[in-house]
Amino acid sequence: MRSEPIDPSGLEWSRVSPKYLRVRLLGWLLGSLVWLVVASVPLVLRLTGVWESFPPEWVAWALPALVLVSAVWRGLLLPRQVAAIGYAERDDDLLVRQGVFFQRTMVVPYGRMQYVDIAVGPLQRAFGICTLKLHTASPATNALIPGLPTEEGTRLREQLSARGESRLAGL
Amino acid sequence: MTTAPGTGGEDPGLPLHGAVEAKDPDAGVPWQRVHFISPLVRGWIALVAILYFVGRDWFEGLFDAGSRARGPLPEGVGLLLAGGVVLGVVLLIAAGFFVAWYFTRYQVTAEHVRVHSGVIFRQQRQARLDRVQAIDIVQPLLARIFGLAELKFEVADAGESAVRLAFLKLDDATRLRATILARAAGVETDPEHPEDIVEAPEREVVALRPGRVIGAAVLSGATVVLLVAAIAVFVLGVVLGTAIVATSFIPILIGVGGAYWSALGTGYNFRAATSPDGIRMRYGLLDTRAQTVPPGRVQALSIVQSPLWRLKGWYRVSVNVAGYGAAASSEGQARATLLPVGTREEVLQILALVLPDPGTERPVELFSAGMTGRDGYEGFVTTPRRARWLAPLAWRRNGFAVTSTALLMRSGVLWRQLVVVPHERTQSLSIEQGPLDRRFRVSTLQFQTTPGPVSPRVHQTDSDAAWDLFHGQAARAAEARRRSAPEQWMKPLVVRQPAAPGTAPMPAGLPADAVPTTGTLSATDTLPTTDALPATGERPAQPGVREIMPEVPSYVPAPPVGGPADAPR
């Protein structure tokens, strides 16, 4: 994994599955298409002459163009965003990192974990990956690891539960 | 019936008895109902509403009887019919409340509190006593008149109360609270008389006079709003040349008045006390409330000073307690307030209750620097100078300091804030860096804690220092959890010998009654020396005695060694 300035040194980060990039790209493609179609409605109406003069022509053009640009930007960013997701298991805690521009690394002690979720959507199931989420007593703990291969997700869940149990502390 | 001391008669009976107990140890514990007039106290609003609407009609009719033609019915029949209908409705509602009351039963066993309720949709709820996060005894005005009280038992679900018993006689409620707390603390009770649990003694540490509470309300943000609104209305009135805008003042006045009222109602007669059961707070003007937060239940604490309070040197102390949740209502805010308005000394006293061992030899100096100080005095690490444009006002104040037991986070220039998180209460933490932060090589640390008014955050600190804190804090939290007090705060511990085998775990030479009898309130006036003791050595070998009041922990200023005190105020 590429080392970012925010990375602590001496940590072995595990990456998420490359399949997750494909899932994200598919989702991005679908989402972008929907937005593009919606944003193109005024332009189509304008060009077919249904709407006479209400949206100025430049607005009608600018709207889909803006959507297209932002979609391309997000698409270009996606591989880096996926590559930035990582997790590291340490003796007492789990580290989760994410983000390219706005980077965040979160540490969740095993003894603080209340439960572990695994969520699989239809698209994720087709690609054989899952999303793992850790819950502590704080609802603000937003530690999720998307794009884990299913067997890795199951292993991690079992391991986290076991470690959590052995290190369980009160609130 | 053999009353002879011979064992022969009892021996065969005992194992059988034991076997039955093992099958259902709680079978003998009686089920109880709340006080029988509580449906009336709970449903009084409905009754008052009915009586009001019906009674007003009837009352008006009484005076207008002569002037109003009431239709064909004779006067007497109409009144009788109306009276019958009203009586029927009232009886129906009363019956509903009665049935609900009849089917609500509770039981407090050695380990659980259980509540069964509901008529058609039955609910059976069970909460473990040692999971208690807080216990409240609430007395709304009407319940106070009847001498009743509501008991609220909170566990860490961040929402509604786990168990609400409304209403009990005040004596019963306090006795039940004592029972629950004693069992939650893990105190061994006399098996012969398990009901024989007395209220733990308490010692008052802070009491607020009404004058202070009123002054705090007057100097609060509501006054600022009122002043701004008054000026705006006046200016508008002058500009528009009409006094009509003055009427728009009325809703503002109502809102501000409400804020004053709730500040007064929740701060009036505020008393904080310490007891072996934990910190106890009582307050209230019309509705009164007594809260108990057992030791080790405070997840995070904040000390805030609003700009106008600076004139008087007042602070407000709020806490996150897992059971209280993040209620935004004034009641929820009041519950999470450990001290509505207090001076620096009172705040330090409250801090000493929450954090008996501050983990530093200069607690007074350190916390004072956190409350009012700037720059790097007393070990605070502030935003580096290169990043001052990211926080042009607050950069000298933003900072953090670490002691061996807690992390202090300082922020805010106008609204000064100091957040204290004990190491063993750290849930999870994250380090964040945006593009601008990266440019100035600073990062922000965010601590996740249970829902509540306090959100611990270290703003814009040097990236390397942030990473040190991030990793160090993870390690310190793990270490602190390992040696933290048990959930049952008076449970006798298996005493590990600190260093030399054979030495008594309690410091010899102290008279027995001077030794603090609870594990958590261990650091007393001899603060600097307790640091040297390992955590296991501080604990008493014997089970805690709830009946003896331990010494009130307090912070002592460090002796002026090594030159003059270098923290400017």
Image (cartoon, rainbow, N blue to C red):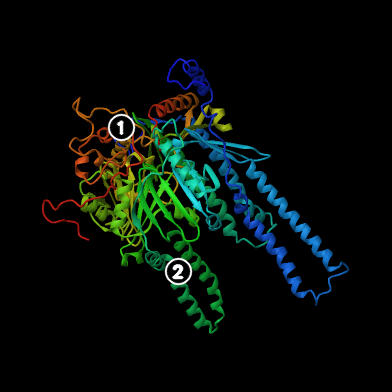
Residue B318 position within the rendered picture, expressed as x and y whole percent measured from the top left: 39, 53
Q: Is B564 above or below relative to B176?
A: below
Tell whether B60 sits left or right of A12: right
Q: Position of residue B74 (x, y in %)?
A: 86, 68
On the question of residue A49 being in view, the answer is yes
- Badge 2: residue crowd in 10 Å (few <14, some 14–19, many ≥20): some
Report which residue position mark 1 lands on: B542
Task: Please give the name of the residue rendered at 23% of the width and 46% of the height, measured from the top-left corner.
Answer: B525
Residue ID at (33%, 33%): B543
What chain letter is assigned to the residue under label 1?
A: B
- Residue B349 at x, y = what percent? 30, 52
Marks 1 & 2 on one chain: yes
Q: Nearer the viewer, mark 1 or mark 2?
A: 1
Residue indicated by mark 2 = B225
Q: Secondary structure at mark 2?
A: helix
Distance of label 1 from label 2 (alpha carbons):
56 Å
Binning the other alpha carbons within 10 Å of mark 1 as few (below 14), some (14 to 19) or many (20 upward) gives some
Task: Please give the name of the residue rendered at 26% of the width and 35% of the height, measured from the top-left corner.
Answer: B535
| Image coords of residue B153 (percent x, y) | 49, 43
| Residue occupying image coordinates x 47% and y 22% | B3
Q: Secondary structure at mark 1?
A: loop
Find residue B413 and report its image quarter.
Answer: bottom left
Quadrant of the image for the C terminus of chain B?
A: bottom left
Asked if residue B323 shows in the view, the reply is no
- Foreground pick, B418 / A34: B418
